[in-house]
Image (tube, grey):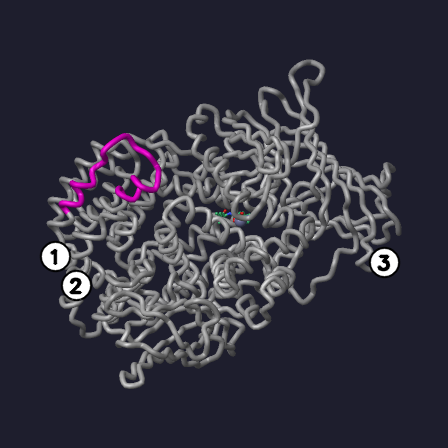
Amino acid sequence: MRAEDTPTIRLEDYRPSDWLIDTVDLDVVLAPTSTRVRALLQLRPNPEGRPGAPLVLDGDEIAPVSVALDDRPLDASAYTVSPRALTLPAPPDRPFSLRIETELDPQANTKLMGLYRSSGVYCTQCEADGFRRITYFLDRPDVMSVYTVRLEAEKADAPVLLANGNLVAAGELPGGERHFAVWHDPHPKPAYLFALVGGRLDHVRQPYVTADGRKVELAVYVEPGKADRAGWALDSLVRCMRWDERVFGRNYDLDVFNVVAVSDFNMGAMENKGLNIFNDKYVLADPHTASDGDYASIEAIIAHEYFHNWTGNRITCRDWFQLCLKEGLTVFRDQEFSADERSRPVKRIADVRTLRATQFSEDAGPLAHPVRPRAYTEINNFYTPTVYEKGAEIIRMLKTLIGDEAFARGMDLYFARCDGTAATIEQFLACFAEASGQDLSAFALWYEQAGTPTVTARGRYDAQARRYTLDFTQSTPPTPGQSEKRPLVIAVALGLVGRDGDLPLGGAVPALARDGIFVLDAAEASLSFEGIAEAPTPSLLRGFSAPVRLELDLDDAALLRLFTADSDSFNRWQALQTVATRALVRAGRGEASDAAASAGAIAGALAGFLDGPASDDPAFAAQVLRLPTPADIAREIGAHVDPDRVHAAHRALATAIASALAPSLATLHEALRADGAYSPAAGPAGRRALRNEALGLLALASPEDATARATAQFEAADNLTDRLAALATMTLIPGEAREAMIARFAALYAEEPLVMDKWLLAQALIPEAGTLERVRGLMARPGFSLTNPNRVRALIGGFAANLTQFNRTDGAGYRFVADMAIALDRTNPQVASRLLSSFKSWRMLEPTRQAAARAALSTVAATPGLSRDVADIAARSLA
Ligand code: BES
Ligand code: ZN
């Protein structure tokens, strides 16, 4: 299909399906290049649909081998087939069955959508619209069916046969070479949640009894020989199941829960009912092949996909415009789980860093869109930070606004009322409006309006009246297709910090919505507190209570007071980040600035911190030591950005701070040496994080000392985290020692593709002119492959995230990434379009780079035969 013929799908055009499919019986005979699929669909007219409407079943790159209606072959005149549909113009006006046979080539399926093979394992990925690549179907989430799936294969080829639901039959076929398994899923589900797996796999398992007494067999399936790396995923699964019972009152609802890891996967993982399929990167872990960060991601993603069982599967989406209904809510749930399992403040800081880096930058560029978009041409391009992360922030804010109890009642109401249905954002919000007695119609604008609001706050103290007043404004910049913006309902969690800590917030005018929560719902508003005995320092947006940019009129001295005295740990962290950001923005713009003074102030604050409170919470201290990144600063500058200048400013400030702190950093690096065997638990991981942060800073202050430390650490390490930190440190120090470590790393981990991905990424991020050549060289290595999404994301995606080298003034970085996107588009459009999204911030650059980026994007847009995925991103990026 040519891009110009691509239809735009609009929310306002939604209408219920004219037909429903009550049951699906699939009979799948697996073979590498010709898998036969027989589907038996029981159809009936939808009472909500148009009577007498034609039946249009979706298809994608498939052809019917045969079609039968009520068991009689269908005359060729009774239906038409196009590349994307099988149509019965005049179907019977009553329930009937259709039997459709298709033949698939899983081996040739490089898009990794539908049924494909990954390292010899048959697997499926159907969200959002991959089921139509398996058989003709009403491939939309509001058509929910009960599935029974019979799988057949050669025993040697696929000893393990899995599908959704419970196993109801299995056995050998005559001859003894072939076998079968029948799976039945009693829960009606949309086609996007269908899954099957067949292959040679090892597994670990564990029995589990739900809080309401159901016996469940949990299992994690992995490549043969890797079962000893599956334990952490299984352990995480047990913990998140208990958590969902305790915190959300949600029990699991089948007799088995299977997780399968595959090595070729477009995304992170997928919540297929009872059969979650994962990118192996988010399952496999042992101390030698997974970092602390990997352990945390595995825990979070196992939880995320498991939590979908209630938020996504039992209650699914009416249409794809409601994607945030399941994704935003489920991200919120997995964030809360991780916060409870680990450190809540540290998790919040990490999530806000991600939000700002990914979502704020998306919201500020040509790909900005509302959390609930109104139109799309390719839904796969809307699995975005906006739908996910901003979607989660809105729910967090809703909880802040109505309070924990009303939020819990609203969730219960939602589960009770919408269970078994395909729901909308309106239905979701109605539950909270009812539970809280509040009118949420103004709040709902968060789902419709794109862009990151800026909130400004100015404080004034009237000593005589003992009154402190805060004057707020809010405004949201225009985004594509939305030039006019309206004020939003913004939750501002706040406190007033005095000499001896938080002052009591008595006599607020207008009254606070809840304890410490001011609701800013107009373009301008003022808030006064009476009986304030001293001039306070305001602490605003505590815990990052709303996804906004905050501009406040505090000077560095006041911010540094907050850094030491704020009772809100998020704002302690934020205060120092703000001081550094301001200095870096000035320097990054090339404005005259007293960088030395800023560095001195920050270093002074950090010195006191490292000598005192840092040791109480090393994970938090690591976050404090980590300055805003050059990309953060570029985003803050927002226009006419020169990445080289930003990078240089960042280097200079970081080096000055590190130099001032060098002795303490060295002491930290020694004192925090591991004192026992490796454990991925949050405590020891936090100590490693702080120690390695110190090492990274030392690389700037004293490269020779850092080289010695990093080299020794690399050799002595009993875990991947410390090795990777040593490698990352050396990427900042050009020279032979670095190249030697790079070679040593490759020798140690040559047989571990997931570890080698980190090696590729570390090199792709080197902020030096030779990096593009290095990346090209790495592509030519035997371990690299353009057909494996993890390899591509590590090396080419990594390069596209390299601020100075992707944005080279000569445009070579852009051309490289554009060429890669074009090349990848021929085999895997989803991976290609995600890579092309790396251009999302091109309009904030200075003119020379803008021109070069535009030229590269235009080359992509002008390429004949582009996928819808890439054509859409190219067109919107250029619009
Ligand atoms: N439902 C998605 C997987 C998905 C994404 C399928 C896009 C089809 C298209 C899954 O629940 C998910 O959100 N996965 C995330 C990880 C998660 C922890 C945010 C992913 O794959 O990145
Ligand atoms: Zn999800």
> Does any atom of ligand 1 lie closer than 8 Å to the CB of label 3?
no
Helix or strand or loop: what does disc 1 sit on? Answer: helix
Q: Which residues are magenta?
A: 666-688
Residue 166 seen in the figure: yes
The amino acid sitting under disc 3 is: Pro
The amino acid sitting under disc 1 is: Ala
**Counting residues from the N terminus, which is met first, the one under dot 2 or under dot 1?**
2
Helix or strand or loop: what does disc 3 sit on? Answer: loop
Residue furthest to the top? 175
* Mark number, residue 484: none
Which image quadrant: the N terminus? bottom right
The amino acid sitting under disc 2 is: Ala
Q: Is residue 242 above or below residue 376?
A: above
Q: Is residue 524 above or below residue 539?
A: below
Residue furthest to the bottom? 464
**Callout 1 crowding tier (Cα within 10 Å): few <14, some 14–19, many ≥20:** some
Helix or strand or loop: what does disc 2 sit on? Answer: helix
Residue 362 position in % (x across, y down): 44, 63
| Residue 539 within the magenta-colored segment of the rendering | no
For the residues labelled 2 and 1, say whether their Cβ atoms are less than 8 Å apart: yes
Task: Single out the mark in the foreground, 3 or 1.
Answer: 1
Q: Quadrant of residue 561?
A: bottom left
Q: Quadrant of residue 844?
A: bottom left
Q: To which residue does mark 2 refer?
A: 599
Q: What is the spatial separation of the Cα atoms under label 2 and label 1, in whole angstroms?
A: 9 Å
Residue 201 position in % (x across, y down): 52, 26
For the residues labelled 3 and 2, say whether their Cβ atoms are less than 8 Å apart: no
* Mark number, residue 660: 1
